[in-house]
Image: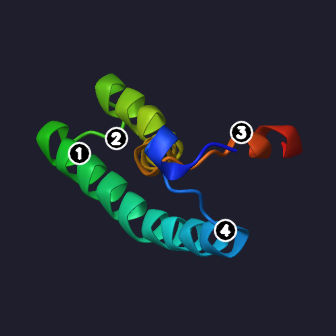
């Protein structure tokens, strides 16, 4: 295992990782639905039509927003979640 000075990243203990993941999950649960809902509402106001093709495409794309944000946060914080791939 490389030291912090060599990698520039702090190694987290399992307990710290767990706490951080819980905080990220909580943040994800609070922000993402609100952001997604506000975006959809605004788009719906503009087009005033649930059946609009662009609205439907946006709706589908926003479904993956939580995954994208989580991945970005993990990368920014230097959290290695590759071990999760084995579980899934």
Q: CA distance from mark 2 to mark 1?
A: 7 Å
Dot 3 lies on which element?
helix
Q: Is residue 7 left or right of residue 49?
A: right
Circle 2 or circle 4, nearest the eye: 4
Decide which of tag 4 and tag 1 comes sooner along the chain: 4
Dot 2 lies on which element?
loop
Label disc, if present, on residue 44 of the rendered structure = 1
Q: Is residue 9 above or below residue 26?
A: above
Decide which of tag 2 and tag 1 comes sooner along the chain: 1
Q: Is residue 30 left or right of residue 42?
A: right
Which residue corresponds to the image point at 50% horizontal and 47% vertical from the top-left? 78
Q: CA distance from mark 2 to mark 4?
A: 48 Å
Circle 2 or circle 3, nearest the eye: 3
Which residue corresponds to the image point at 18% horizontal and 49% vertical from the top-left? 42
Q: Nearer the viewer, residue 45 or 81?
A: 81
Q: Is residue 46 left or right of residue 16?
A: left
Dot 4 lies on which element?
loop
Circle 4 or circle 1, nearest the eye: 4
Q: CA distance from mark 4 to mark 1?
A: 45 Å
Q: Residues within 10 Å of mark 3 (few under 14, many from 20)?
A: few
Label pair 2/1, CB-CB below 8 angstroms: yes
Query: For mark 3, what is the residue?
Result: 82
Q: Residues within 10 Å of mark 1 (few under 14, many from 20)?
A: some
Give the quadrant of the C terminus. top right
Q: CA distance from mark 3 to mark 1?
A: 37 Å
Tell me where residue 3 appears, x and y as whole percent.
57, 48
Decide which of tag 3 and tag 1 comes sooner along the chain: 1
Query: For mark 2, what is the residue?
Result: 50
Q: CA distance from mark 4 to mark 3?
A: 16 Å
């Amino acid at each position: 295992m490389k030291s912090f000075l060599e990698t520039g990243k702090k190694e987290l203990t399992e307990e710290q990782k767990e706490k951080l993941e819980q905080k990220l999950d909580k943040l994800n649960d609070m922000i993402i639905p609100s952001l997604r809902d506000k975006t959809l509402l605004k788009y719906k106001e503009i087009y005033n039509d649930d059946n609009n093709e662009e609205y439907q495409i946006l709706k589908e794309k926003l479904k993956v927003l939580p995954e994208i944000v989580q991945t970005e946060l993990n990368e920014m914080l230097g959290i290695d979640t590759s071990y999760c791939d084995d579980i899934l």
